[in-house]
């Protein structure tokens, strides 16, 4: 059973999607049945993921819950899955956010509920497969599989510009993944396998590592996104319905950072040192640029979208400090950002659905009519700007501790995300929640019990991550420490070899 647990977690959502699609056809009653089936399936997967967490040994940095089956065996390709501490935390994040997004969809997704449930569950399976894949071709298959349900959720249930936003998202991501496919083929040609643990030990030449890392940067930089590959993000996040925005920003964007970590920092440490100054610069630019643009927005969801972009720049900085503190901080920031940004999209959506507008100028005094929303939104706003006691503070602190080892100026400029974040998020909060009543705001009703049930777990986890971060860092820190030590040893060996060659030439 322990070996089958990961496979059960991965494919149970797909089974739920198929049942909902084929057996819940009909009118409103069948639509409601599909929604209940989707919520029940995602809650069952969450329970299984917690069981996976309980059975995981954090003291072992290697793979656990492995499954290896023959696939294209003659070509060195297999169905190989397993989790280490890094994979596990992203599986937990996915399992946690999906039922909340499913529950939020009960109010915001008013048509085609069966199709929505099927798309959400298919996306969950693709994300689980992506995070647990230990074969590069299998990773690529699941990575591409996320595109279909995500694009459909934007294109079918999105706002007025949903078709354009969906097309942008699909083309940018699909175009970027072409570079991953090329890198995959080159690596298979060189090593004769696509097994990730084998590729980690393949010993690619330094020049080839550089080209491979460049290909992965282009592939994952789109999804992260890295500046200037972010053009798809504002429209996709602002046009998508709240449940899709929560999953897109909370989990799907993390697949880019996860890929850069796996196939950049961990697999090609020598090339990562070469590229680090450029990625750090792009990360700092993203932090500051997105913060300034966020402040100029007039649409609530676009403010939150650019806030997400700014924080993803902070994650890129943490990864390419190539220090244990920085990488730990980047992973922790991915988790905390996933929780907080999903909550902010839910809060903004609650106001937009009631007032029928996302324009900041049309709102004001919402706190008088919706005090519970105002309280929860204040918590998530403070978490987004890195208030001590919340998870974001821990992640940003660790990233800055890693950045200070690299450059004082990188740490100073990256720290600007806290200052700029406070400016645009508190400005948004003041203008929407306080001030004089605007338009029909006096008719708004406070959060329902269902909406509180969605936001309360997010609030609890935000505080849990800030008060007891060790619950999460102990899972992935052994993997990071081992990788950083290996990278340092590799770099030292390479430097010694270059010195020997230089002396021999003399």
Image (cartoon, rainbow, N blue to C red):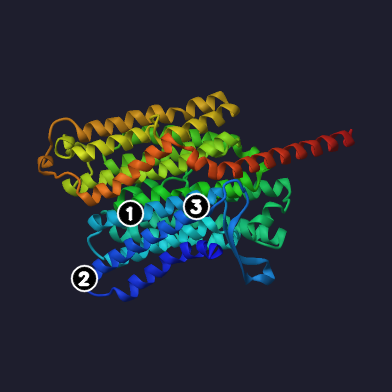
Question: Closest to the observer: 495 or 384?
Answer: 384
Residue 315 lies, in percent from the top left, at 49, 39
Say whether disc 3 or disc 2 marks the residue closer to the N-terminus.
Answer: 2
Answer with left or right where residue 20 lies relative to residue 146.
left
Number of dots carrying numbers:
3
Asked whether the viewer can see residue 227, the reply is no
Residue 220 lies, in percent from the top left, at 52, 49
Asked whether the viewer can see residue 169, the reply is yes
Which quadrant would the C terminus be assigned to in this image?
top right
- Secondary structure under badge 3? helix
| Residue 321, quarter of the rendered image | top right
Q: Which residue is mark 1?
A: 101
Mark in front: 1 vs 3:
3
Residue 438: assigned label: none
Task: Tell me what residue is drawn at x 47 percent, y 46 percent.
Answer: 224
Q: Which residue is mark 2?
A: 29
Q: Which residue is mark 3?
A: 54
């Amino acid at each position: 059973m322990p070996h089958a647990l990961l496979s059960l977690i991965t494919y149970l959502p797909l089974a739920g999607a198929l049942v909902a699609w084929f057996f819940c056809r009909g009118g409103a009653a069948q639509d409601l049945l599909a929604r209940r089936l989707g919520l029940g399936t995602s809650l069952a997967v969450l329970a299984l993921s917690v069981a996976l967490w309980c059975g995981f040994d954090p003291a072992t940095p290697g793979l656990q819950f492995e499954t290896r089956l023959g696939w294209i065996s003659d070509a060195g390709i297999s169905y190989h899955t397993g989790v280490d501490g890094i994979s596990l935390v992203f599986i937990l994040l996915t399992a946690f956010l999906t039922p909340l997004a499913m529950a939020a969809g009960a109010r915001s997704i008013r048509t085609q509920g069966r199709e929505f449930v099927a798309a959400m569950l298919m996306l969950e399976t693709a994300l689980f497969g992506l995070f647990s894949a230990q074969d590069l071709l299998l990773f690529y298959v699941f990575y591409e599989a996320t595109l279909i349900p995500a694009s459909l959720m934007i294109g079918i249930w999105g706002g007025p510009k949903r078709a354009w936003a969906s097309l942008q998202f699909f083309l940018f991501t699909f175009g970027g993944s072409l570079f991953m496919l090329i890198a995959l083929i080159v690596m298979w040609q060189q090593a004769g396998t696509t097994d990730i643990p084998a590729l980690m030990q393949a010993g690619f030449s330094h020049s080839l590592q550089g080209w491979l890392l460049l290909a992965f940067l282009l592939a994952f930089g789109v999804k992260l996104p890295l500046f200037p590959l972010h053009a798809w993000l504002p429209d996709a996040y602002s046009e998508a319905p709240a449940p899709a925005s929560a999953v897109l920003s909370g989990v799907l964007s993390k697949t880019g950072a996860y890929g850069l970590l796996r196939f950049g920092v961990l697999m090609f440490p020598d090339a990562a040192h070469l590229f680090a100054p450029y990625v750090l610069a792009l990360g700092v630019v993203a932090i500051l640029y997105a913060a300034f643009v966020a402040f100029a927005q007039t649409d609530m969801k676009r403010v939150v979208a650019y806030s997400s972009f700014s924080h993803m720049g902070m994650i890129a900085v943490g990864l390419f400090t190539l220090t244990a503190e920085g990488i730990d901080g980047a992973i922790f920031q991915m988790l905390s950002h996933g929780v907080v940004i999903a909550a902010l999209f839910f809060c903004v959506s609650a106001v937009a659905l009631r007032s029928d507008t996302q324009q900041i100028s049309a709102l004001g005094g919402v706190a008088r009519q919706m005090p519970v929303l105002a309280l929860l939104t204040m918590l998530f706003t403070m978490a987004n700007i890195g208030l001590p006691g919340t998870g974001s503070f821990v992640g940003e602190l660790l990233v800055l501790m890693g950045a200070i080892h690299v450059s004082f100026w990188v740490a100073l400029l990256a720290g600007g995300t806290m200052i700029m974040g406070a400016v645009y998020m508190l400005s948004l909060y003041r203008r929407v929640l306080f001030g004089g009543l605007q338009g029909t705001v006096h008719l708004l009703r406070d959060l329902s019990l269902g909406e509180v049930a969605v936001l309360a777990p997010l609030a609890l986890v935000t505080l849990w991550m800030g008060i007891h971060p060790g619950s999460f860092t102990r899972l992935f820190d052994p993997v990071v420490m081992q990788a950083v030590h290996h990278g340092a040893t590799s770099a030292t060996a390479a430097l010694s070899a270059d010195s020997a060659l230089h002396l021999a030439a003399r």
